Structure formats: structure tokens, C-alpha cells
């Protein structure tokens, strides 16, 4: 997710939404190899078309500047790794000798992630807090209270997202593949939200 968040910042929400929706296809392919789910020839054709579109999007972003190009590459790799997490999560939670609930798995996963982010903040961000945090806040005219409110909102939304996601992976028919398909809906919602927040119009 770190690669996806960084890539979205560099490439912008529109390119991010296009590439990140490929999680659906990555999940389907990895489910074939890790979980043994079958795919027919038309599904494989869809996979080839999506990967072709990703290639065109990645190379097309070169003309938009190195930052957008590098951001697009980060999102492509991050999407593949995110899909791998989908599949492995389903495999672990539904293993015959594993009696782990979706909420417990979510808690373990979140604890490990928070510990990794905590180490990064302590050993890297803390040494560059002026350049990476305080100066950009001044440029954006953002207060500490506003930043804290935004991060709190992100935290609450992420909690809801994670709990519902792991519940879907464990109990919903299709598991990781179904969760990946829902990424298409996320892509549509990102386009709508971008139009409302940044463009204030749908035209």
C-alpha cells in the first residue's frame, strides 16, 4: 500500500484509478496459480487486454514527466503486490488447520503494518521532519489540527475498509477474486470524487 499511496501522489488520482483497478486482474491470475481457480479462454483474453492497457498507460505517462511515469510504475507494482496479499490472505484464513477469524487476521495484519510504519517514522521521517512535513504544510497553509483531522478521518475509513475487506475475502463467494472485482467500483468512485472535489462538474 505504501507504493500505491506514493504512486498516487506522484501520478495523480486519475492515472492511479486506472492502474489500481488492475488489482482485479492480478487477483484473478494469482488465484489461478495459488488457489487453483480455473479461468476460461475469454477470461485469459481479458487479462491480456488489461495488461496491454496497463503497458500503454505506463508508457503514455512518460510524456507527462518523470514524476508521473515513476508514480505509474509504483502503482503497477503496488497493485500486483496488493493482489498477492488478497490471495495469500484468503489462503491463510481458509486453510484447514487455521481457525482465524477475519477480525483477528485484520488485527494481526494491521499491527504488523503499524509497527513497520512506526519504525520508518522513528528512523527516517523524524530526521527529515522539517523538509518532509513542516515545510510542505507551510506551503499548503495547513495547520497541525487540520492535518490531524485528515489523518484521523483516513484512519477511521481505513479501519472500516480493512474489516469489510477481510470479511469479504473469508466469507464472500469467490473470496479474493470477488474482492478484486470490487476494485472496479472503487475506480469509478474515484473518478466521481475527483470530478466533484477538483473539477466541481461532471462535464
Image (cartoon, rainbow, N blue to C red):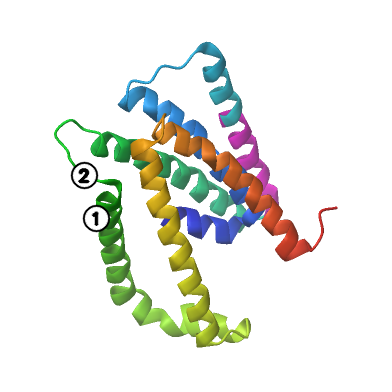
Across and down, in percent, residue 136 comes to: 56, 80
Across and down, in percent, residue 91 comes to: 27, 34
Up/down of 109 relative to 182, above or below: below
Q: Residue at x 48, y 37 (%)?
A: 180
Which residue position is annotated with label 2? 100
Left or right placement of residue 103 versus residue 14 in this view: left
Q: Residue at x 52, y 18 (%)?
A: 44
Q: Residue furthest left?
A: 97
Across and down, in percent, residue 170 comes to: 33, 38
Residue 11 versus residue 114: which sits nearer the camera? Answer: 114
Q: Is residue 81 visible?
A: no
Q: CA distance from mark 2 to mark 1?
A: 10 Å
Q: Residue 108, which numbered label?
A: 1
Question: Circle 1: is it few (<14), some (14-19), or many (20+) Cα within 10 Å?
Answer: few
Residue 19 versus residue 32: which sits nearer the camera? Answer: 32
Residue 174 versus residue 24: which sits nearer the camera? Answer: 174
- The range drawn in magenta is 51-64
Q: Is residue 53 magenta?
A: yes
Up/down of 98 relative to 161, above or below: above
| Quadrant of res 33 | top left
Q: Residue 63, which numbered label?
A: none
Up/down of 116 relative to 21, above or below: below
Q: Is residue 109 magenta?
A: no
Q: Residue at x 17, y 40 (%)?
A: 99
Which quadrant would the N terminus be assigned to in this image?
bottom left
Q: Secondary structure at mark 1?
A: helix
Q: Is residue 20 visible?
A: yes
Left or right placement of residue 186 versus residue 180 in this view: right
Q: Secondary structure at mark 2?
A: loop
Amino acid at each position: 500500500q505504501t507504493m500505491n499511496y506514493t504512486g498516487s501522489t506522484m501520478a495523480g488520482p486519475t492515472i492511479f484509478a486506472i492502474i489500481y483497478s488492475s488489482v482485479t486482474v492480478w487477483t484473478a491470475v494469482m488465484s489461478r496459480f495459488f488457489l487453483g481457480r480455473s479461468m476460461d479462454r475469454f477470461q485469459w483474453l481479458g487479462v491480456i487486454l488489461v495488461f496491454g492497457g496497463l503497458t500503454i498507460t505506463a508508457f503514455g505517462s512518460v510524456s507527462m514527466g518523470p514524476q508521473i511515469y515513476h508514480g505509474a510504475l509504483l502503482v503497477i507494482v503496488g497493485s500486483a503486490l496488493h493482489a498477492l496479499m488478497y490471495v495469500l490472505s484468503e489462503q491463510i484464513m481458509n486453510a484447514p488447520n487455521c481457525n482465524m477469524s477475519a477480525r483477528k487476521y485484520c488485527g494481526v495484519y494491521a499491527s504488523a503494518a503499524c509497527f513497520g510504519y512506526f519504525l520508518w517514522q522513528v528512523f527516517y521521517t523524524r530526521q527529515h521532519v522539517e523538509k518532509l512535513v513542516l515545510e510542505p504544510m507551510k506551503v499548503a497553509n495547513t495547520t497541525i489540527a487540520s492535518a490531524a483531522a485528515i489523518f484521523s478521518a483516513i484512519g477511521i475509513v481505513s479501519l472500516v475498509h480493512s474489516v469489510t475487506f477481510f470479511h469479504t475475502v473469508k466469507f464472500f463467494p469467490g473470496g479474493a477474486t470477488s474482492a478484486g472485482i470490487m476494485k472496479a467500483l472503487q475506480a469509478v468512485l474515484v473518478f466521481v470524487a475527483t470530478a466533484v472535489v477538483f473539477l466541481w462538474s461532471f462535464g
